[in-house]
Structure formats: structure tokens, C-alpha cells
Image: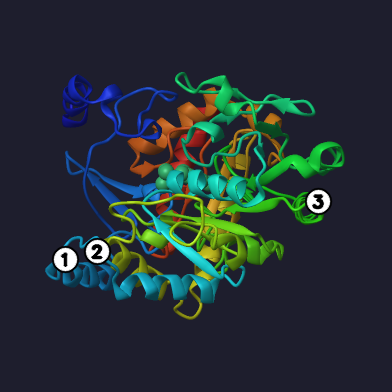
Amino acid sequence: MDQNEVLFDRAQKSIPGGVNSPVRAFRSVGGAPRFIKKALGPHMYDVEGKQYIDYIGSWGPMILGHNNPHVIEAVKEAVDNGLSFGAPTVGEIDIAEEIKRLIPSVEEVRLVSSGTEAGMSAIRLARGYTGRNKIVKFEGCYHGHSDSLLVKGGSGLLTFGTPSSAGVPTAVTNDTIVLEYNNPKQLKELFDKEGDEIACVIVEAVAGNMNMVPATQEFLETMREETAKHGTVLIVDEVMTGFRVALGGAQSLYHIDPDITMFGKVIGGGMPVAAFGGKRDIMNSVAPLGPVYQAGTLSGNPVAVTCGLATLHEIQQPGFYKRLSEQTAKLVKGLGAMAKKHGVAFSAQSIGGMFGIYFRGKCPTSFKEVMECDADRFKTFFHAMLDNGVYLAPSIYEAGFVSITHDDSVIARTLEAADEAFAKVKR
Ligand code: PLP
């Protein structure tokens, strides 16, 4: 047994499933997750000292690669000033102003500590602001693990939500309507019938929780039109895509003006910072100004905010997103070529520093098509890559992430590993 297996055994005796977030477990691919000791740039090192090229990037935040010296220096300085005060700090104004400057749809922003909190609070705000109860989400989109959003989609028009977790009462999800992603016709039909009763629509503009599925322009435009027509709040969840697919987020790529945007991951640079923000009129309904209660002991934590701010400064270096997008595109193009060489049905695509790989001939455009990917082939590929020092997300339903430190030699190393891995998949 290697150290990772020994530790996984030990972890399972004290932590449910041995992990503090289920996505870290290797349930769908089998085996023991690697216990990471340290990381630098594009690499992580496990407790045995084995090096991995990291395509998880802490599930999105590590856009600068690990241990960026400017970020680490700023964090160390902040630590010296104290860990938490429970009173306002200048850094909170700085990060709010920075977000507003980079995301013009945001006029006011409230900091929280996780994407889940951002989603939960945004939904409460939309309901409080509109005085309506019904919410709309889309099949395959994930917005954190708060009760009313933990509904997987059934297909078919107006599928009312059934909870996808034990412990979520049906009463809580009765007002959650789940529609098909990228189906503008279905969305319009719903709004024609009951648009005036819907508090909000919440969407990932590039879905990153059913592997990666970009929205179509028509889908998002229809959503914006219908929500505006019916006084429904449009919440764009940019927890994953914010500062990841472009400096202005997915909303800048699609030219969509959301009422509320959720942020997380990159805005914390690896520490617990998330946020929800948007139109002033709506945001003024939040306590202490308005009747919608929302709070947090560690919200806007000074050390975490310093980490986020330093990260936001670094990503504004000239040419940052051009390079990040190019490196990510090189990766997916190379993987496609390797799969072709070995005659494996495979497709891949990227947007900014985010990518999807699919064991099917064409990139999927819907949840249904994602479900058609070959999970067994992915499993073989995943383990072959891991053995060869490349750490991909251990599931066919997760997007991948590239950092600015993934240079040509790192991509080339990845493709060498992929050459061997695809050969194994074919066998
Ligand atoms: N929204 C999206 C799009 C996400 O990808 C995630 C997490 O992966 C969340 C919300 C929840 O964020 P957190 O895990 O910080 O609670």
C-alpha cells in the first residue's frame, strides 16, 4: 500500500467517505484520492513526493497556478495584521470596487464565504425583492448545495423539482422548476404561462457542472428578454466562469446584462471568498438596508480578501487571457489529435482557461448528450493519466482548468501522457 492508500484508510475512519467534499473522492473512477502535500505553479505533489500536472486547480480558483509569489507575499502581510475583526476593512471596499469596475452589471456587491452561500442568498434576495416564490433552474447546472437548488432535472416541460439529496423536504423544492439547458422554446412556453409568478431564473452561462456545455446565444437572449418582460430577476452564476472564461466573465462573452451575478472561486484566489452583486435597486433589499436577511461571521475576511484582491490584480496583466486561452486551446487541440491517432471517439473544447473533454464523437450541447459520454473509457483514461503524473477531475461531469503557469512544456508533457492513455483506452 502506498501512503495515499494508508491515509485514505485512516481518513475514512474519521471523515465521511474520507473527504470533506464529495467531488474529491474517486467514487466514479475507483481507487484512493491523492493526498496533496504541496503545490507550485502547474504542479501538485502528493505525500509520496509524486508530481502531478494539475488540471483541477482547486476546482477553479488557482488561475495563477499555485503559490504565486505576489499573492503569497500579500497574504503573509495581511496575516501579520490579524486574522479577523468582525468590523469593516478597507480591503472589502477595494475588492467591491474592483469587481464593479471589471463587471459593469454589478452596482453593489455583498461578500460571502462560498458559492453555495452566494446562491442561497441570491435566491432569497430575488424572492424577497419580487414577493414571488417560484424559481427556475436548468438540468445539469449546479449552484451550490442549498436546499431549494439541490434539484436535479427531469426532462420535459415544467418538470417540478424533486430533491436530489436526502434531507431536502419536497416542500422546499416544490417551487423549483427545472427546465432543459439550451432549450429556449421550453423557457418561453413556461414564461408565457406563468412568467409573472417567477421570482428568478438562475443559470450557468457556460455550464461547468455537467462537464462543460456552453449556452447558446439564443438561449441566454431569450432568458434575458423573458425575465425582463415579466419582472423576473435574472441570476447568472459566475462562480466558476467569473474571471475564468474572460476578465469580464461569461456575461462579457455573451453580452448579457444580468440583474444579479454570483461569484466565487477565482475572486478568492484559493481562499474562501464569494459574492453576489448586481443592480442597486435589488441589492438595496439586503439587510441592513432592506428586509432580506443575510449575514456571515467571516464574510469579507481580511486575509481571504487580500488573497482575492492580489489575484484580481495579477489577472489584469496585459495579455493574460490571451495567453491563458491559447494554452487551454493548445491542450484541447492536442488531446483531440491524440485521440484521433488512436481512433478513440473523443471531442474537446475550451473557453478561456476552462475546458471540457468528452468520450463521444461531438461536443455535447445538452445534459442528455453529456449523459451519452463513455464513462468506462474515461475511467481508463483518467487512471492512465494519473499514473503518468496528470491529475484530471475524477468524473466525466466536471470541467477542467488551466492556469497561466501551464506553459508549452507542461502541455507537451500532458500530451505525451495522453498518447499512452488513449492507447490504453483503445485496447
Ligand atoms: N456555482 C457554481 C457554478 C459552482 O461551480 C459551484 C461549485 O463548484 C458553486 C456554485 C458552489 O460553490 P461552493 O463550492 O464554493 O459552495
Write down the residue under mark 1: 79
Q: Above or below — where is 15 with respect to 128?
A: above
- Among the 4 quarters of the image, the one containing residue 342: top right
> Left or right of 173: which side holds 76?
left
- Among the 4 quarters of the image, the one containing residue 369: top right
Q: Secondary structure at mark 1?
A: helix
- Residue found 67% across the figure and 52% down from its top: 233
Q: Secondary structure at mark 3?
A: helix
How many tags in the picture?
3
Q: Secondary structure at mark 2?
A: helix
Camera-nearest label, 3 or 2: 3
Mark 1 Cα-neighbour bin, 10 Å: few <14, some 14–19, many ≥20: some
Q: Are marks 3 and 2 in contact (CB under 8 Å)?
A: no
Q: Earlier in the sequence, mark 1 or mark 3?
A: 1
Mark 2 Cα-neighbour bin, 10 Å: few <14, some 14–19, many ≥20: many
- Among the 4 quarters of the image, the one containing residue 199: top right
Tag 3: residue type?
Glu
- Residue found 59% across the figure and 27% down from its top: 173
Write down the residue under mark 2: 303
Q: Earlier in the sequence, mark 3 or mark 2?
A: 3
- Residue found 40% across the figure and 31% down from its top: 383
Q: Are marks 2 and 1 in contact (CB under 8 Å)?
A: yes
Write down the residue under mark 3: 226
- Residue found 47% across the figure and 36% down from its top: 146
Q: In the rendering, at what x and y percent does residue 138 appear?
A: 66, 37
Q: Above or below — where is 426 with respect to 328?
A: above
Find the distance from the CA under tag 3 to the CA under tag 2. 41 Å
Q: Earlier in the sequence, mark 2 or mark 1?
A: 1
Find the distance from the CA under tag 1 to the CA under tag 3. 47 Å
- Which quadrant of the figure contains the N terminus? top left
